Each structure stands twice: as structure tokens, then as C-alpha cells.
Image (cartoon, grey):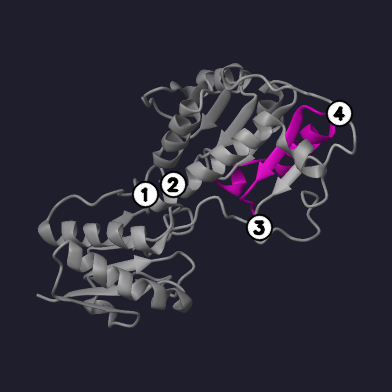
């Protein structure tokens, strides 16, 4: 039987994804299929979906075996009341590699104090020697696929890394904590804090006035995870009094970040335009194709979203 696959992302993505999905489907042995951007809903077997795409009402897709999300984040779709089909999130090697590169780069940037050199010393021959990585504790909040990969990469550079998650995890080379007490302990040593938690009601504003005060004075915050993880007013207040030395932020509650937002002008904030990790079409297509193969073979889907936890 022909497998009908609906590509439901923004139209400009289609010319890139069409040949790559065809190639990936061939690699996994799915040969009899129809791949299109417009199919009768009652005939669709799989929806390759972006939350900002054209499909917002999933109720007509009564035959669909799964909705295969192109994004790592699912907060924009997981609570859709019309979504009754299994939902998978995107976990792929390209996305993971992009995130680890951004995190490693900015961790080293702040550890080495590179901003002073990049902006110029203006003749001031001041040799501020940074400690070795072994003396710079780093904490990663969130030990999912991205968080665990970033934590291990940073640990591989010689930093002592503590990871925190809501439930107990084990990551080789990383001190893993969980729960409320674990969060306090994880924050108390974090000279560099990296946020890689999903956006859920439980994680919203996890970095607030109380938790910011737990960090060592002058700590650096890196947020390539989700904008709602941070109470923006509390972070700005902590920056203004020196409790936080610098914040490098890639994600925000409103994107693009409004030009009037105080982050743009703050001397101790770096804004990057949501570039820490983007879904790479080539590697993402392989994940999508493998999940379609699994669905047709009656095997469990990869990266199935737990509706109760929201990720």
C-alpha cells in the first residue's frame, strides 16, 4: 500500500526538503510512497510538521499514524487539543552538533575573557590570566539529548560539569543532580550556567530572582534553550547589580527580539538571533524517514513525546 506523507511546513522549506526526504526514504527502504504538500486529509499516513506550518487542526487526519515534528521544541504543538496522533520531536545529529558548537564556543569565550581582547585593550597591557578549566565549574540545566551532549562536550574540555534535570539521569563524566534540593546545589557552584530545559509550565521562570541569587556572584548565564526559562526583569536586575556578570541569550519570549527590549542596549548582554541550533534538513530527513519506516514495520517511534511531561 502506498504511504502518503504530507509535508506541513512553510512553503519555502519544500524545495530543500523534497529531494532530501526522497533520498532518505530510499535509504531506509520505503519505496512506495506519495510525498506532497497537499493531500486529502483522510488519506494522510504521516505528517511531517513544523508548528508554524499550515496544519493547525489535526482532527481531519483520521488515518495519520504519527505527526513527525521538524523542531526539537514541541511546546507550540503538544497542547493542541486536536492533536490525538502520536507526536515525535526532532533529535538528530546535525541539530545536536550545532548546539554543542554554540555552547562550547560561548563557554570558552567567557571562560577565557575573550570579549576584552576582541573589543580592544586600548593600550592597557593588563594580563588577567583566567583559571584553568578545571577550576571553572559549569552547570547545565536540562539533561535531555541536547543537554547531555553539551554537558559531555564541556566536560571533555576539562571543566567540572554538574547537570540537573527534573528526574534522575545518569550522564558519563557529569555529576547529575535532580529535584529541588539538587537544583539549589547545582546553581550554587555554577560560574557558568547553561540552560537547556524544555519550555513547560514547570520550567517557566526557573531562573528568577531567587535562583539567580543562588549563583556565585559574577556568574555567566548562557541560554540557548527556551526564552520562557528566564524571568527577564529578574535577570536584568541581577545584571545591574553585578550578581550576574554577563548573559548570552539566543532565545526569547518574543522573536525577533523587539528593538525596544533592554537586552539590546545592556552592556553585559549578548544577543544572538536564535542560531544556536537549527534543524539541518539533511540529517533531519534521515530521522523522519527512519520513523516512517518504523511506523510501517510496527516498531516503536523514535523520540516519542510524553504528553504528560510536555516533551
Q: Is residue 306 left or right of residue 149?
A: left
**Residue shown at 39%/40% (left/top)?**
145
Which residue in the structure is indicated by mark 4? Answer: 125
Contact? badges 3 and 4 (CB < 8 Å) = no
Please say whether residue 66 is one of the residues in the magenta stretch: no
Q: CA distance from mark 3 to mark 1?
A: 27 Å
Contact? badges 3 and 1 (CB < 8 Å) = no
Q: Image quarter for residue 80?
A: bottom left
Which residue in the structure is indicated by mark 1? Answer: 93
Question: What secondary structure is marked by label 2?
Answer: helix
Q: CA distance from mark 3 to mark 4?
A: 41 Å
Stretch of the chain drawn in magenta: 225-253
Which residue in the structure is indicated by mark 3? Answer: 254
Mark 3 surroundings: few (<14), some (14-19) or many (≥20) residues within 10 A: few
Mark with earlier residue (4, 1): 1
Which residue in the structure is indicated by mark 2? Answer: 97
Would you place residue 121 above or below residue 168 in this image? Answer: below
Amino acid at each position: 500500500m502506498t504511504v502518503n506523507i504530507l509535508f506541513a511546513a512553510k512553503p519555502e522549506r519544500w524545495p530543500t526538503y523534497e529531494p532530501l526526504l526522497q533520498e532518505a526514504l530510499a535509504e531506509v527502504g520505503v519505496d512506495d510512497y506519495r510525498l506532497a504538500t497537499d493531500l486529502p486529509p483522510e488519506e494522510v499516513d504521516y505528517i511531517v510538521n513544523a508548528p508554524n506550518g499550515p496544519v493547525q487542526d489535526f482532527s481531519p487526519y483520521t488515518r495519520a499514524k504519527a505527526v513527525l515534528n521538524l523542531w526539537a521544541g514541541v511546546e507550540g504543538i503538544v497542547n493542541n487539543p486536536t492533536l490525538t496522533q502520536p507526536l515525535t520531536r526532532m533529535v538528530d545529529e546535525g541539530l545536536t552538533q550545532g548546539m554543542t558548537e554554540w555552547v562550547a564556543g560561548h563557554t570558552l569565550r567567557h571562560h577565557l575573557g575573550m570579549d576584552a581582547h576582541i573589543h580592544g585593550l586600548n593600550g592597557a597591557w593588563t594580563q588577567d590570566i583566567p583559571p584553568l578549566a578545571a577550576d571553572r565549574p559549569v552547570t547545565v540545566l536540562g539533561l535531555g539529548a541536547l543537554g547531555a551532549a553539551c554537558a559531555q562536550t564541556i566536560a571533555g574540555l576539562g571543566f567540572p560539569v554538574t547537570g540537573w534535570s527534573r528526574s534522575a539521569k545518569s550522564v558519563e563524566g557529569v555529576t547529575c543532580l535532580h529535584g529541588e534540593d539538587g537544583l539549589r546545589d547545582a546553581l550554587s557552584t555554577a560560574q557558568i550556567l547553561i540552560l537547556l530545559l524544555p519550555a513547560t509550565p514547570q520550567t517557566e521562570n526557573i531562573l528568577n530572582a531567587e535562583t539567580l541569587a543562588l549563583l556565585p556572584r559574577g556568574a555567566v548565564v548562557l541560554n540557548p534553550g527556551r526564552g520562557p526559562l528566564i524571568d527577564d526583569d529578574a535577570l536584568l536586575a541581577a545584571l545591574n547589580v553585578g550578581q550576574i556578570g554577563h548573559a548570552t541569550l539566543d532565545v526569547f519570549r518574543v522573536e525577533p527580539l523587539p528593538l525596544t527590549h533592554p537586552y539590546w542596549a545592556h552592556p553585559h548582554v549578548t544577543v544572538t538571533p536564535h542560531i544556536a541550533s537549527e534543524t539541518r534538513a539533511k540529517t533531519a530527513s534521515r530521522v523522519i524517514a527512519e520513523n516512517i519506516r518504523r511506523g510501517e514495520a510496527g516498531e516503536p517511534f523514535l523520540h516519542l513525546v510524553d504528553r504528560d511531561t510536555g516533551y
